[in-house]
């Protein structure tokens, strides 16, 4: 009885048998799924731009928040105005954040197609880069400050 039951198979156009699976990694690589994801992403971006242009521009947006924070602390934020959209008008305020979000989302989607070992290496490289960028600036300024003033001091003192 058990010999009569075989694997569930799908017949291809050439008459060959190919096992069918619902494994997500294999499903994501099919052209139908990729086309659906691209159409959904374009529709989502279009919907976002329509909602932003209708309800958000000029009333409540992130550039007003950045202006308020700069007024409260009394100095400029270390983020460039071209990144936040300050000084732009209309949908121009949202173009760079939208491009940054799409590129980050696209890179995360491409990362999902990699092998687990490659994913781990990329994530480790990203974390090391962030650590070097954040701590490296402190260490370099502290070391240069000690060299120019010829005294030893803690990195916490100025």
Image (tube, rainbow, N blue to C red):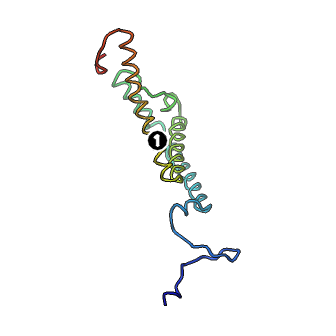
Which residue is outermost to the bottom? 1
Which percent across, then down, holds residue 54?
50, 44
Q: Position of residue 122 (x, y in %)?
A: 49, 44
Residue 80, placed above or below residue 31: above
Viewed as shown, does residue 122 lie left or right of 68? right
Quick one: label 1, few (<14), some, or many (20+) residues within 10 Å? some
Mark 1 — residue? 56
Q: Nearer the viewer, residue 38 or 110?
A: 110
10 to 44, vertically: above or below: below
45 or 106: nearer the viewer: 106
Q: Look at 48% across and 49% down and name the residue there.
A: 119
User: Which picture quadrant has residue 148?
Assistant: top left
Residue placed at 51% from the left, 38% from the top?
A: 94
* Residue 85: x %, y % from top left: 50, 32
- Residue 131 lies, with reference to residue 111, above or below; the image says above
Q: Where does the C terminus fall, quadrant-wise?
A: top left
Q: Position of residue 34 (x, y in %)?
A: 59, 58
Who's the residue at 54% across and 79% down the image? 7
Q: Secondary structure at mark 1?
A: helix
């Amino acid at each position: 009885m058990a010999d009569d039951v075989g694997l569930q198979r799908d017949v291809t156009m050439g008459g060959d048998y190919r096992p069918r699976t619902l494994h997500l990694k294999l499903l994501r690589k099919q052209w139908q799924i990729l086309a659906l994801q691209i159409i959904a992403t374009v529709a989502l971006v279009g919907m976002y731009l329509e909602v932003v242009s209708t309800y958000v521009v000029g009333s409540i947006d992130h550039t007003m928040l950045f202006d308020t924070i700069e007024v409260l602390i009394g100095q400029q934020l270390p983020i460039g105005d071209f990144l936040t959209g300050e000084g732009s008008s209309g949908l121009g305020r949202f173009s760079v954040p939208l491009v940054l979000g799409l590129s980050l989302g696209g890179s995360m989607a491409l990362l999902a197609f990699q092998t687990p070992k490659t994913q781990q290496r990329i994530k480790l490289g990203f974390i090391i880069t962030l650590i070097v960028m954040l701590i490296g600036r402190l260490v370099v300024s502290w070391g240069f400050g000690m060299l120019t003033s010829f005294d030893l001091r803690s990195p916490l003192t100025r």
